[in-house]
Image: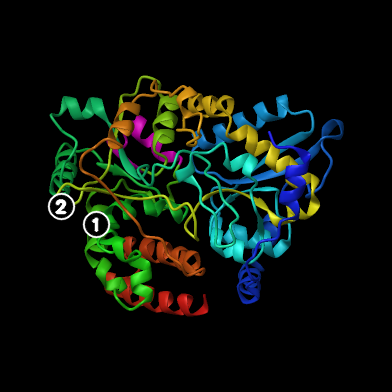
């Protein structure tokens, strides 16, 4: 644990990055209409906790039941052992877009002490998040965090950095066995698998699009081979911004997305919540389901039906390669936990946040995360953590990390307005999937919006 002197020094440290006023003003203006949605969430910063303890809020993105359970379990365990701090989890409603919600938080000035951060570089440059002290980073494996240009660390991982290996297909293993089906090793085999299930009179695939972000669960694996082509040059989105690529380069995965939606998706995907897909799978309403929760989704399924024999696989490329996006440990695409500048200015809030993170990266907390159903963060004392292999299908997840066809790629946009474009792009893809616009119209409007957003950024 850090000393009071170390925390005080970290509180006083000022980031050596200039404030981007235009970015802050724009973020506030974008969120102004939605501001009331989060303005009243939780106790105000600096509020007193029970027994004179410092009360802090932890804003995090919901999505699957397992992650909600992990946050609840870890905060409750921390609160039980801390004599000075109470952490109150503040889940963002699942129907909200997280990037937009952060803008709302900023517009209302109601920052929690701890934030499940997105668009890290943007908020770092705007002076909205605080440096994280060495007492926290020293607990982590060296490769899972990195200092910014000013030498300070602003983001630390919430779970293991296994890239986007969680974007996969979960399926009914018993159905596969009973019908002589196998996990596909090429994209053509994946389509043949969908055809075989459909020929049996069953719905091949459950998808969710009641919120815009789960649309990535089917899109990202389909687009990954194209994204991977630009990995060594800084990533696809940076290439588009530089004029070295266009949205039209994504036509093939768009066409594949449309085909899968039209011919194989369970009806009602437009109004299906992400959390509902586990129930649809277990109830036999679909044989497979999209996911981005990795081990957490398998755990959700086991909670619905402990006897359900679940498995998972990644949609392969034409040549069988499993293209998986690497985690970024810095920049705008880095995701994880940050401490707000507002907490740093308060002082006590900052100390409380640091104390929580020191617990979060302890063996005790990591064991609790594993028991609850996620792969815990990569900590230096990782050899002491007890891995959870009891979840049905967990062996499939861990096998993916050792798969010889696994190929990591990078795709880290540098423009701070990229998240604004991504929200637009997700919604536009859903419109295409739902026959509101054509693929040509999707490409045209997305290219125009991209150029507009990048220029503003």
Residue at left 15%, top 46%? 186
Q: Nearer the viewer, residue 172 or 361?
A: 361
**Is the Cβ of the residue at disc 1 closer than 8 Å to that at disc 2?**
yes
The colour style of the image is rainbow
Q: Say whether residue 26 is magenta.
A: no
Q: Mark 1 or mark 2: which comes first in sequence?
A: 1
Q: Residues within 10 Å of mark 2 (few under 14, many from 20)?
A: some
Q: Picture coordinates of residue 109 (x, y %)?
A: 73, 61
Quarter location, residue 249 = bottom left
Asked whether residue 40 is in view, the answer is no
The part of the chain drawn in magenta is 275-290
Q: Picture coordinates of residue 336 (x, y %)?
A: 54, 47
Quarter location, residue 225 = bottom left
Please give the residue where the numbered disc 2 appears in the rendered image: 318
Q: Give the CA separation, mark 1 to mark 2.
A: 9 Å
Q: Residues within 10 Å of mark 1 (few under 14, many from 20)?
A: many
Assign a secondary structure to mark 1.
helix
Q: Nearer the viewer, residue 255 or 119?
A: 119
Q: Picture coordinates of residue 241 (x, y %)?
A: 38, 75
Above or below, 373 against 216 in this view is above
Asked whether residue 402 is in view, the answer is yes
Quarter location, residue 19 = bottom right
Say which mark, if any, is on residue 146.
none
Q: Picture coordinates of residue 208 (x, y %)?
A: 40, 48
Q: How many marks?
A: 2
Assign a secondary structure to mark 2.
loop
Q: Say whether residue 278 is magenta.
A: yes
Above or below, 72 against 129 in this view is above
Please give the residue where the numbered disc 1 appears in the rendered image: 225
Q: Quadrant of the N terminus?
A: top right
């Amino acid at each position: 644990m850090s000393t009071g002197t170390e925390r005080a020094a970290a509180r006083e440290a000022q980031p050596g990055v200039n404030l981007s006023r235009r970015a802050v003003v724009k973020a506030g203006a974008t969120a102004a209409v939605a501001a009331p949605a989060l303005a009243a969430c939780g106790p105000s910063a600096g509020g007193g906790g029970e027994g004179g303890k410092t009360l802090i809020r932890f804003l995090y993105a919901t999505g699957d039941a397992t992650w909600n359970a992990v946050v609840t379990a870890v905060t409750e365990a921390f609160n039980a052992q801390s004599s000075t701090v109470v952490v109150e989890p503040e889940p963002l409603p699942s129907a909200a877009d997280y990037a937009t919600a952060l803008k709302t938080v900023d517009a209302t000035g109601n920052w929690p002490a701890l934030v499940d951060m997105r668009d890290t570089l943007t908020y770092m440059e705007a002076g909205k998040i605080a440096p994280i002290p060495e007492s926290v980073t020293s607990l982590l494996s060296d490769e899972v965090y990195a200092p910014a240009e000013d030498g300070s660390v602003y983001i630390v991982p919430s779970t293991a950095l296994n890239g986007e290996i969680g974007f996969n297909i979960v399926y009914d293993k018993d159905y596969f066995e009973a019908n002589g089906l196998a996990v596909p090793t090429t994209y053509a085999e994946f389509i043949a698998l969908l055809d075989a299930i459909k020929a049996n009179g069953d719905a091949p695939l459950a998808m969710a699009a009641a919120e815009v972000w789960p649309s990535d669960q089917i899109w990202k694996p389909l687009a990954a081979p194209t994204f991977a082509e630009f990995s060594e040059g800084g990533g696809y989105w940076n290439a588009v911004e530089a004029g070295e690529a266009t949205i039209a380069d994504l036509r093939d995965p768009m066409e594949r997305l449309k085909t899968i939606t039209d011919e194989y998706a369970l009806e009602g995907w437009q109004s299906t919540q992400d959390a509902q897909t586990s129930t649809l799978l277990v109830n036999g309403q679909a044989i497979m389901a999209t996911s981005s929760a990795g081990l957490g989704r398998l755990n959700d399924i086991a909670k619905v039906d402990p006897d359900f024999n679940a498995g998972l696989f990644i949609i392969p490329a034409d040549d069988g390669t499993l293209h998986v996006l690497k985690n970024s440990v810095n920049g705008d695409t880095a995701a994880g936990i940050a401490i707000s500048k507002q907490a740093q200015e308060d002082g006590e809030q900052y100390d409380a946040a640091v104390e929580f993170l020191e617990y979060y990266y302890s063996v005790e907390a990591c064991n609790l995360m594993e028991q609850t159903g996620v792969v815990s963060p990569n900590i230096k004392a990782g050899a002491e953590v007890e891995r959870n292999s009891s979840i049905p299908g967990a062996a499939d997840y861990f096998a993916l990390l050792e798969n010889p066809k696994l190929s990591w790629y990078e795709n880290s946009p540098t423009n701070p307005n990229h998240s604004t474009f991504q929200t637009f792009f997700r919604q536009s893809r859903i419109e295409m999937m739902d026959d509101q616009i054509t693929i040509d119209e999707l490409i045209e409007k997305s290219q125009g919006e991209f150029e507009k957003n990048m220029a503003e950024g």
